[in-house]
Image: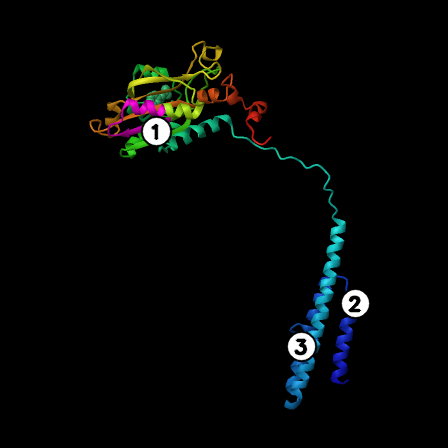
Amino acid sequence: MTMQNRLDEIRDGLLQKLKEATDKQHVEQLRTAILGRKGELTGILRTMGSLKPEERPAFGQKINQLRNELEQALDSAARTLEEKEKAARLKAETLDISIPGTRPELGAEHPLISTMNAIVDTFVSMGYSVAEGPEIELDHYNFELLNLPKDHPARDAQDTLYFSPNILLRTHTSPVQARTMLSQKPPIRIVCPGRTYRADEVDATHSPAFSQCEGLVIDEGVTMADLKGALASFATAMFGEDVKVRFRPSFFPFTEPSAEVDVTCSACKGKGCPKCKGTGWIEVLGAGMVNPKVLDMCGIDSKKYTGFAFGIGIERVAVLKYNIPDMRLLFENDARFLQQFGKGR
Ligand code: PHE
């Protein structure tokens, strides 16, 4: 057989097989069989070495021409088959775009968490940073360093849940004050949000697990006027311009002087209703000037520095902010209640 005949045979054979090919994979197999490293045409090209030098250019040109022609035929067959396969797939995968979709259930932030975040944001915008501490606390930080020595009568008011005589569930976020003073130098300006625990019976305004947000500011020349200013800004940010704030003298062993701070009841706007027990006011936090004894125990020079602290009851604020009639709703996790706080419904 002459070389030309052999080449014609390869070409005709391939074109015939391409006509019969039914999928792209088959086309690729044919490509390898002829043009691949061990393919027929490649094999012929390798015999070029045995030709006379003057015969080689013509031979090479011929093989290359054929190679290009076959490559084009293979490519076009592959493309045609690909389009056919795609058309068949689209036909098989019909999609009914008129069927209504299934709406995903959107979750919502729990009102207690939104309230906590709103409180923290308010103070962060005033330049406070956030500090945290453990919920299982040592007596030392929860009581001792806060000027509540053993047998102090004020300990009764805290109804503590103990693990052992020295380990307890923190009764307030104030131990984070003590921990911060021991580890940082003034100026200090922090808020500490978190869970707190007391052995209280559950009712419309009490729960054994609740949350507070502590605040602590210590610097030279900090006064009670600064405390009032900070809390007034907090109250308007939380409840609007109309809210009124009132300080009542109180007692905490870790602050002196101390105050209980009330805001006007959101349900009756201060007129008096069952929610505020007819007083028009709701207590939301305790506060005061940090007792110099506490500063000294925590390694801060009370002759140079003064400070204020406050502890906000988050549930109380949430109940006021969202006008929730009973604090228990915040803990029961009834979906009908929580769904009202969902967004995008
Ligand atoms: N720790 C107090 C409480 O839980 C609140 C408080 C904090 C009072 C800081 C004064 C200063 O009742």
User: Which residue, given by chain and number where applicable, does mark 2 sit on?
Assistant: 19
Distance in Å between CA atoms under marks 1 and 2: 82 Å
> Which label sits in the foreground, 2 or 3?
2
Q: Residue at x 24, y 23 (%)?
A: 293
Q: Is residue 110 above or below residue 45?
A: above
Asked which secondary structure carries label 2, the reply is helix
Callout 1 environment at 10 Å: few (<14), some (14 to 19), or many (20+)?
A: many
The percent coordinates of residue 29 (x first, y second) are 71, 67
The quadrant the C terminus occupies is top right
Q: Is residue 172 above or below residue 83?
A: above
Quarter, ligand 1: top left
User: Which residue, given by chain and number where applicable, does mark 3 sit on?
Assistant: 42
Whether the magenta-drawn stretch holds residue 224 is answered as yes
Q: Nearer the N terminus, badge 1 or badge 3?
A: 3
Identify the amino acid type marked 2: Lys
Asked if the residue under mark 3 is in contact with the one under mark 1, i.e. CB atoms within 8 Å, the reply is no
Give the label on residue 176, or none. Answer: 1
The quadrant the N terminus occupies is bottom right
* Quadrant position of residue 56: bottom right
Q: Residue at x 52, y 30 (%)?
A: 109
> Which label sits in the foreground, 1 or 2?
2
Q: Can residue 27 be seen in the rendering of this structure?
A: yes
Asked which secondary structure carries label 3, the reply is helix
Q: Is residue 334 above or below residue 105?
A: above
Question: Count the marks: how many?
Answer: 3
Identify the amino acid type marked 1: Val
The percent coordinates of residue 86 (x first, y second) are 73, 55
Does the numbered disc 2 mark a residue whose Cβ is under 8 Å from ligand 1?
no
Give the label on residue 244, or none. Answer: none
